[in-house]
Image (spheres, helix red, strand yellow):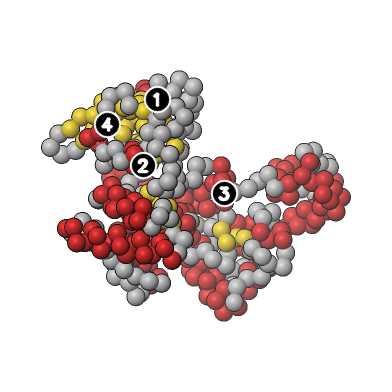
Amino acid sequence: MEVWTGYPHNGDAGKRDTIDRLAYLLKDHEVIFALGNGTASRETENVLREAMKKASGRGCYAVVDEAGASVYSATELAAKELPSLDVTHRGAVSIARRLMDPMSELVKVGPQSLGVGLYQHDVDQKRLEEELTGVTQCCVTAVGCDANRASPELLRYVAGLTPKLAEAVIAQRQDSGGFKTREELRQVRGLGPKTFTQCAGFLRIYSGKEPLDATSIHPESYGVAKKLQQQFGPRLDQLKEVLDEQELGVGRATLQDIVAQLRGAADDERAARPAPTLKSVSGKHTTSTGAIDAALAGVTVDGLKQGMLVVGTVRNVVPFGAFVDLGVQSDGLLHRSQYPRSAPRDGSWPVINEVIEVKIVSVSRDQRKTKISVSML
């Protein structure tokens, strides 16, 4: 790993040196940059875009929420994972990891440090921690994790695994050179039959000896899964109704889950969520509806006018609305009253990372900050 620190905001010389170094990097490598959305993010984005232009448009980048990255970088865990790097560089690595695998990285930071909740300091802290831990556990349970790659911080949220057992899984993985089957999890010190039953369905083994180990199907149900495969073969992709559950010895809910996995209809639900937007210097400045991409068009906050259509990315959702990254120095507030009339009112919309087109309602400035209101009506 190559480590280099640029100083693009330290005078013209620092800016030119940063652009030259980045352009040189882009000429020799295919690079995706993870750009934190913190202090001087927009100014840094402009420097990055200049470097990409100098490299004939090579490379792309995504803006990543860096909330809590500085908290992680100062922890013992960060020092253990990245012992050769200083605190600043550890934070940079964390931001890049968030672009690659958000869940695996975000679990290393206490949910209270992610800035996604209002009034969190006004409620009972013990109760808050219990609730947030439960939500995190539900997220990990819903998508599972790779037993051969997951960190101990991620494993501790798997049902049945304590922090001590998570460390034991890591130790066994290192000693054995990796798990080849789920059954090998039984060799983990301290992981008994009951714990195996609890956690096995959430720990995936990819490219192992048993293909079903890469699914959420529990080992106890492998017999049923294989029976269905033998009976229906390649027709499983068209299978919607199956045999009576009593004949197969499992409940209807379990049977439906097995069929969904075998049909490939139960993919990682994160795939249905909006992916981070990758930007390049060769992209279009406007959409078919006339909305501009402020970053691509070089529009700053001073260039925003009432009635202007702008492409934005949802960064946070709160009870009263959503904050939208408009590609300028300040996010815009999309109040609930300004949601489109067709939008569901059950809290399922909007979602983080969703790209939307908004209209500028107002831009007000004071000595402290710029406030931008947007609408989708």
Q: Residue 142 carries which label?
A: 3
Q: At which x and y percent is residue 237?
A: 77, 44
Which of these two is toward me, 10 or 119? 10
Q: At which x and y percent is residue 335?
A: 34, 27
Camera-nearest label, 1 or 3: 1
Q: At which x and y percent is residue 258?
A: 72, 48
The earlier-in-sequence mark between 2 and 4 is 2
Q: In this rendering, is residue 242 above or below 183? A: above
Q: Do the residues labelled 2 and 4 touch (CB within 8 Å)?
A: no
133 left or right of 47?
right
Amino acid type of the residue tagged 3 in the rendering? Ala
The earlier-in-sequence mark between 1 and 4 is 4
Q: In this rendering, is residue 278 above or below 148? A: above
Q: Residue 304 carries which label?
A: 4
The earlier-in-sequence mark between 1 and 2 is 2
> Pointer 2: what residue?
296
Taking the spot 36% from the left edge, 42% from the top edge, the residue there is: 296
Q: Are marks 1 and 4 in contact (CB under 8 Å)?
A: no
| Residue 354: quadrant of the picture | top left
Taking the spot 36% from the left edge, 52% from the top edge, the residue there is: 53
Q: Which mark is residue 335?
A: none
SS for tag 1? Answer: loop
SS for tag 3? Answer: helix
> Pointer 1: what residue?
376
Label 2 and label 4: CA atoms lie apart by 14 Å
Amino acid type of the residue tagged 1 in the rendering? Met
245 left or right of 275?
right
Label 1 and label 4: CA atoms lie apart by 16 Å
